[in-house]
């Protein structure tokens, strides 16, 4: 599990950096497309994280859900600043094990 | 001194227009166009120690920058900013907290320009109060426009700044969140830029395609300087309370042109070339007619009729039209070189206007320069007729190219179909009428149809004639008293200057040949990476001196005009740079060599045109 989580993170972090770069460079459509393609990896990473986590899984699950809801809200509003912050600084740090 | 006072002091020094707006509060927050729903502006602190803005609008929060790292965000943004071209123009919407602007100004070259439009004055004021902006505001290459009130200033600035050589080096940048916060203002901003670009391209297409024809026409038309007048002779010759009527060939002319006979003798009637046929068919004789187009088809100049009324025209207008016209020519504009020749003999043509691009706009400038205080526009539709297809009087329907379509406001507030070029003229009229308010000019749009022209009083032609055309004017008497502008002595002096011009062409040709060789040498030096050694510097200096030598010749503007079309295609690429300095220099000298080759050929062509078309006055007079 730990190995798979680490492998996912190795894919996730640079991919999220690339998405964030697109958003900051105001290449929105490219950023959104890349995010769309990355969603399965994010999903798998969250799953692996929750399984591997030693902390209270309910608390962890709620924390991740909250971040994802904020991300979704920002995506709906096309708020690229908040999206970039959530992806780069909140989602990644939350999923680090 | 607090931030606000310090920033305002700097604004007063460098951005006086902006300072005036803020100082006088000359923006009305109760104006219905003004964004009222900015509820709050506050400051948040980012994790990397910067103050960022948080704006609340319509109940929603807009965090303007990253709460974690403004530096990382800005550095990523800058990666997208291409500063490889020279003389770039960055059109930036949004000031934000100033950090993006500061970093952009550091990133670009000193020759690049940043035109910044902040749509919301409250945001700008807040930033002035809470951030130190002196470093940004002192930059010479930054030009600021704030709020709706300054959009017209932005438009005027773009008109002065953007021309064919930098139009492709513009970059439009919208600061984060501004597109979401101010979609209407973004639309206005982009429309202003786009409209200006279209204006530039239209002007350049005109100039480029007419270059050779202008030279041909000039030397065919120069014979008419004998027995002509110039616009100089018409300053204030008509009483101030007599209006001018400009008759254009829009579809609405058919509705009301029969009224024009009631104005005859009580107004001075100017007909554009294309309206002549219609007027003559209704036995309406204008007092003057106007033509400017170097390629105007003969059929559009009173087809089937002998036109004898005096003709306001340019030396570069279609020579075939000037030949068939039977009356007196009145030149209001000379072409390059001849313009200088006339000034040299002390009889230059004084006309300081931009013609506006159409015969109707040119007629308008002529009337203003002549001193008319009231101008009545007839047939000035600047739009298709109600059927959406008819473009000119006489039920002429031009094929509608939907790519060039433009929808505008009609005189009754409805939306009507127009064209891109008419839209340019519509804006031109609005701007010109606004600029002429100071001289007490009144413009009445008596077209009774078409587009709404900003700044005009709209009324029926019959009402306009009743209200404004009451004083008698005797145009024939004024014309009979007019002495010709150029006497024989003047014509012979002009002839002598043209002979000097022919000699100058030979000198320019020789210089172009040698300079072309110098450019070839520089290309080889660039390939060997020795362009900047002592020899390279000497060669470059010789090329620069050669340019100066040619440019100082009186006839050079004519050569320049002749090669414009081909030179433009070459010059566009000169402004694109790569990362390799030697490669860029080699490209620059390669293009320059092509230009000098064009100049060499142009001198031969122009020489031939002058010899074939110019009828010397000295040959007709054995006593000289």
Image (spheres, rainbow, N blue to C red):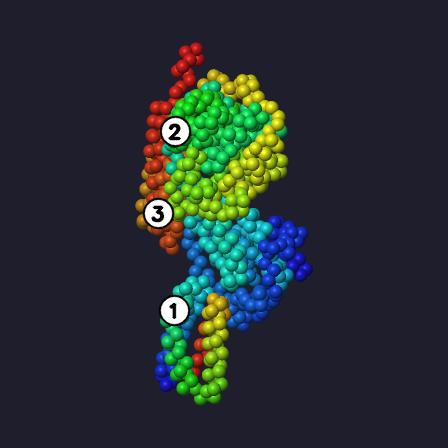
Q: Quadrant of the C terminus of chain B?
A: top left
**Element type where label 3 sits in the image:** helix
Q: Quadrant of the N terminus of chain B?
A: bottom right
2 and 3 marks on the same chain: yes
Q: Please tell me how crowded label 3 is: few (under 14), some (14-19), or many (20+) other residues with Cα within 10 Å.
A: some
Q: Is residue B244 above or below residue B389?
A: above
On the question of residue B191 being in view, the answer is yes
Q: Which residue does the image show at 52% across and 32% down from the upper left?
A: B246
Q: Which residue does the image show at 61% across and 52% down from the upper left?
A: B18
- Chain name for mark 2: B
Can you tell which quarter of the image residue B130 is in?
bottom right
- Can you tell which mark lies on residue B587? 3
| Front one among A43 and B58 | B58
The residue to which callout 2 is attached is B298
Residue B435 locus on image (x, y percent): 58, 40
**Element type where label 2 sits in the image:** helix
Numbered marks: total: 3
Residue B556 locus on image (x, y percent): 42, 32
């Amino acid at each position: 599990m730990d190995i798979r989580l680490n492998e996912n993170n190795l894919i996730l972090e640079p991919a999220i950096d690339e998405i964030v770069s697109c958003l900051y460079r105001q290449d929105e459509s490219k950023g959104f497309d890349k995010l769309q393609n990355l969603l399965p990896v994010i999903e798998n990473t969250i799953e692996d994280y929750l399984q591997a986590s030693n902390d209270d899984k309910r608390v962890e699950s709620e924390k991740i859900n909250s971040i994802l809801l904020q991300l979704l809200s920002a995506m709906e509003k096309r708020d690229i600043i908040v999206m970039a912050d959530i992806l780069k600084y909140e989602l990644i740090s939350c999923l680090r094990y | 001194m607090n931030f606000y006072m310090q920033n305002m002091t700097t604004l007063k020094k460098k951005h006086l227009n902006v300072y005036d707006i803020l100082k006088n509060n000359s923006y009305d927050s109760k104006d219905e166009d003004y964004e009222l729903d900015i509820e709050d502006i506050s400051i948040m602190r980012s994790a990397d120690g910067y103050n960022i803005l948080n704006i609340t609008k319509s109940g929603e929060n807009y965090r303007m920058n990253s709460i974690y790292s403004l530096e990382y965000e800005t550095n990523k943004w800058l990666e997208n900013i291409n500063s490889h071209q020279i003389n770039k123009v960055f059109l930036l919407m949004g000031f934000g907290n100033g950090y993006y602007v500061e970093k952009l100004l550091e990133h670009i070259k000193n020759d690049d320009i940043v035109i910044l439009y902040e749509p919301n004055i409250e945001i700008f004021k807040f930033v002035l109060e809470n951030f130190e902006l002196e470093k940004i505001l002192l930059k010479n290459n930054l030009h600021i426009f704030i709020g709706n009130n300054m959009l017209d200033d932005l438009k005027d600035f773009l008109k002065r700044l953007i021309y064919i050589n930098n139009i492709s080096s513009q970059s439009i940048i919208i600061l984060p969140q501004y597109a979401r916060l101010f979609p209407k203002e973004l639309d206005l901003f982009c429309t202003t830029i786009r409209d200006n670009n279209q204006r530039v391209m239209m002007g350049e297409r005109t100039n480029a395609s007419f270059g050779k024809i202008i030279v041909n026409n000039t030397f065919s038309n120069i014979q008419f300087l004998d027995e002509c007048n110039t616009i100089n002779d018409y300053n204030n010759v008509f009483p101030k309370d007599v209006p001018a009527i400009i008759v254009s060939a829009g579809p609405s002319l058919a509705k009301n042109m029969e009224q024009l006979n009631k104005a005859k003798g009580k107004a001075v009637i100017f007909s554009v070339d294309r309206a002549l046929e219609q007027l003559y068919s209704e036995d309406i004789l204008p007092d003057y007619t106007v033509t400017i187009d170097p390629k105007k088809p003969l059929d559009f100049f009173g087809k089937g009729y002998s036109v004898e009324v005096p003709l306001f025209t340019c030396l570069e207008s279609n020579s075939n039209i000037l030949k068939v016209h039977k009356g007196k020519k009145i030149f209001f504009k000379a072409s390059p070189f001849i313009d200088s020749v006339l000034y040299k003999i002390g009889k230059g043509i004084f006309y300081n206007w931009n013609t506006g691009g159409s015969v109707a706009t040119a007629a308008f400038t002529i009337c203003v320069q002549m001193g008319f205080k009231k101008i009545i526009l007839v047939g000035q539709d600047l739009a298709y007729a109600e059927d959406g297809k008819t473009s000119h009087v006489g039920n002429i329907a031009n094929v509608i190219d939907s790519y060039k379509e433009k929808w505008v406001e009609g005189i009754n507030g409805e939306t009507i179909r127009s064209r891109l070029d008419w839209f340019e003229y519509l804006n031109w009229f609005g701007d010109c009428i606004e600029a002429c308010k100071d001289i007490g000019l009144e413009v009445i749009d008596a077209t009774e149809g078409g587009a709404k022209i900003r700044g005009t009083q709209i009324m029926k032609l019959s009402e306009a004639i009743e209200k404004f055309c009451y004083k008698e004017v005797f145009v024939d008497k004024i014309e009979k008293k007019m002495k010709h502008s150029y006497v024989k002595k003047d014509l012979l002096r002009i002839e002598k200057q043209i002979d000097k011009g022919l000699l100058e062409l030979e000198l320019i040709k020789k210089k172009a040949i040698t300079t072309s060789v110098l450019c070839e040498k520089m290309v080889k030096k660039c390939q060997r990476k020795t362009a900047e050694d002592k020899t390279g510097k000497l060669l470059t200096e010789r090329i620069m001196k050669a340019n100066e030598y040619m440019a100082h010749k009186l006839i050079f503007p004519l050569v320049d005009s002749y090669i414009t079309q081909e030179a433009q295609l070459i010059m566009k690429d000169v402004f694109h740079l790569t990362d390799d300095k030697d490669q860029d220099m080699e490209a620059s000298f390669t293009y320059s060599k092509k230009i000098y080759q064009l100049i060499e050929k142009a001198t031969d062509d122009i020489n031939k045109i002058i010899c074939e078309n110019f009828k010397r006055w000295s040959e007709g007079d054995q006593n000289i």
